Image (cartoon, rainbow, N blue to C red):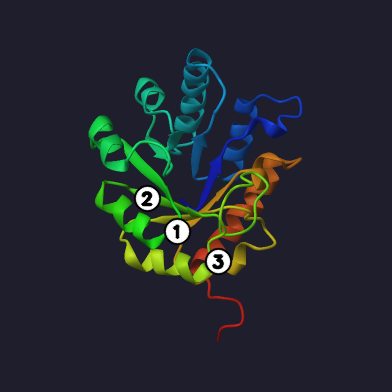
Amino acid sequence: MRLYAVTDRAWLKGQTLVMQVEEALKGGVTCVQLREKTMDEKAFLAEALEIKEICKKYSVPFFINDNVDIAMQCGADGIHVGQEDMVAANVRSKIGESMMLGVSTQTLEQAVEAEKNGADYLGVGAVFATSTKSDADLLDHATLKAICEAVSIPVVAIGGIYKHNIMELAGTGVAGVALVSAIFASDDIEKECRELRAASERMCSGKPEGSQ
């Protein structure tokens, strides 16, 4: 969960999404989530199968965003759902115990409930202002830390995270960071991921800035 890549087609720049995902994997991302909001089911499944094989090549878990049916059809390692999607308990009952379940949460109550309903990890945010999801409410870092302390499953911070602010999350207890534009808007995805992975490792093992 150190460096969790969430796909977005906004910055393909002549490449395919598959090519960009492989660059990210070469750079050291530790999880990949395929997010497609407008693609038809047939194309989505074909893309999911292709990216799943690339993730398998690099021994990195592959997640599908929201679409439980596609996740099950392609044999993904996991599914990630938001608060507006299926209730976590219903998703867990549908996918069984063999597939990982990630749930987006914004409050302490949601986090505790998600763990109780079978979540394997939480995506928590937005921790900084983000252009990727303009309607996302900002989550203060004290609440992020409280969530990390309240649950026993990994917490991944998301929302507006870049190299320049990632160390502000040190000391919160997060297991890693989930990034969209910081990865896929980069001109050199592999190089950027190497630097982001190193920064995430430092953040997760370090102390808050200014502490002794």
Which numbered disc, 2 or 1, marks the residue closer to the eye?
Answer: 2
| Label 2 sits on residue | 121
Toward which corner of the image does residue 19 lie, by quadrant?
top right
Question: How packed is label 3: few (under 14 Cα within 10 Å), some, or many (20 or more)?
Answer: many
Q: Position of residue 78 (x, y in %)?
A: 37, 36
For badge 2, the amino acid type reads Tyr
Residues marked 2 and 1 touching at CB (< 8 Å): yes
Taking the spot 60% from the left edge, 68% from the top edge, the residue there is 168
Q: Position of residue 136 (x, y in %)?
A: 57, 50
Q: What whole-number distance in Å separates the C-alpha atoms at marks 2 and 1? A: 10 Å
Which residue is at 53% across, 61% downward?
139
* Residue at the top extreme, as displayed: 42
Please state if 109 lies on the left or on the right of 126 as rendered.
Answer: left
Sequence order check: which comes first, mark 1 or mark 3? 3
CA gap, disc 3 and disc 2: 18 Å
Task: Tell me which label, 3 or 2, sits earlier in the chain.
Answer: 2
Amino acid type, mark 3: Leu
Kindly identify which residue carries mark 1. 175
Residue 138, position in %: x, y? 57, 59
